[in-house]
Image: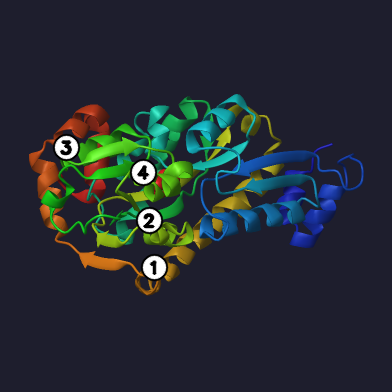
Amino acid sequence: MRLDRRTLLASTASAVAVGWSIGRSRPAHAAEFSFKAANNSPESHPLTIRMREAAAATLKETNGAVDIQIFPNNQLGSDTDMLSQLRSGALEFFTLSPLILSTLVPGAPVSGLGFMWSGYDKVWPAMDGELGAHVRAQIAKSGLYAFEKIWENGFRQTTSSTRPIVTPDDFKGFKIRVPPSPLWTSMFKAFDAAPMSINFSEVYSALQTKIAEGQENPLVLIDTAKLYEVQKYLSKTNHMWDGFWLLANGKTWNGLPKDVQAAIQTHFNAAAVLQREDIAKANATVEKALIDKGMQVSTVDTAAFRTKLQSAGFYKEWRGKFGEDAWKLIEKVTGPIA
Ligand code: X2X
C-alpha cells in the first residue's frame, strides 16, 4: 500500500505524483487524508496566503491524496477555542504564538521576552536552531507536534486611540489589550499599564467600543486587520518579537505514514521561510501605508522602556519562571540580560 520511500526520494515531482496514485486505493477525486488547518490572521496576511500555497502544493504532490483545507481569520473560533480543538483532534493543524501556547507549555515563550532580540540576524538562526529545538521538544511532550520552521508575525508595536505612547510613563494606567498569556500581562504590568487579556478575534471590536484604548501588534497585522480604522497613534516600541508555531495534533500527526508527513513538512516548512521574506518585504512599505491611512507615528527611545522592565523586576521574575537552563539558552543568543 505504501509508496516506497526510495522511489519518492529518487523521483521527479511528476513521478512523485504518479507514485502517489499507484498503490493507494481510493475513489477518484476523494482525498485519502482530509485535514483542517486554521489561524487567527486575515485572508490577506502572508501567513494565510502561504498556508494556502503550501496546502495546494501538498495536494498536487500527493496527487490529491492529502487535502488540507485552510480556515483563516478565526473562522473556527478564537485562539483559545482553536487550541482546545487542536488538542481534542477536532482540528488537525493550527498556528499559534509561542506566548499563548504557554498556557499549555509553560516554557514555550522563551522567545518572547521584552527587548531580547537585536534583530532578525539573531531571531532566525536561534529559532531554527537550539532555542527553537528546545521549545519544540517541550511542545512534543504536551501531545502536540510543532513543525521545524516557525512562521513570522513580527516585532510588536503599540497603537492607541487616546494618546501617543512616547515615554514609558505614558503607559501608566493605559488600558491595553494583550493576547491571553501570562508573559504579556506581566510585561505590561511592569510598564504600569492596565493590561486586559483578549483573544485576537475580539480585538477590533474591543478597540472600536473603547473597552481597550490600545493594543500592540506587528505592522503587517495592524495593516491587514485594519486596526488603523480604530486606532490613531502608532508608537514604534518594538518591544517584543513574536512568531507562529505551526502545530499539529500529536496523535493524528504520529499516526500518519512517513511519506505523508514528509510531503506536508516539505511544503509547509518551505512556505514558512517564504512567508518570513514576505513580511520582511512588506515591512519596507507598511509604515508609510499606515500613515497614508491616517495613523500618526511616534519613534520612541526603546532603551528607556527596557530600563523600566529591568527596574520593575521583569527579567528577574521570568528568569525564575523559565529556570537557569532555559535562561542560559536565551543568553546564548542575546548576551547577558539581567
Ligand atoms: O493576538 C495577537 O495579537 C496576535 C495576532 O499577534 C497573535 O497571534 C499573538
Nearer to us of marks 4 and 2 is: 2
Query: In terms of image quadrants, where is residue 313?
Result: top left
Question: Mark 3 falls on what kind of element?
Answer: helix
Q: Where is residue 94 shown, x and y percent of the image?
A: 56, 40
Q: Nearer the viewer, residue 59 or 263?
A: 59
Farthest right residue? 27
Residue 127 seen in this snapshot: no
- Residue corresponding to mark 4: 130
* Amino acid, disc 4: Glu
Kindly check if marks 2 and 3 are in contact, taking CB atoms under 8 A apart as contact: no
Which circle, 1 or 4, is nearer the viewer?
A: 1
For marks 1 and 4 on the same chain, the one whose residue lies earlier in the sequence:
4
Residue that mark 2 sits on: 154
Contact between labelled residues 1 and 2, with CB atoms less than 8 Å apart: yes
Gap between marks 2 and 3 measured at Cα: 22 Å
**Residue 288, x across and y down, in percent:** 36, 74
Q: Which residue is mark 3?
A: 314
- Looking at the rendered structure, the secondary structure element under dot 2 is strand
User: Of the residues shown, which amino acid type is indicated by label 2?
Assistant: Gly
The x and y percentages for residue 108 are 37, 35
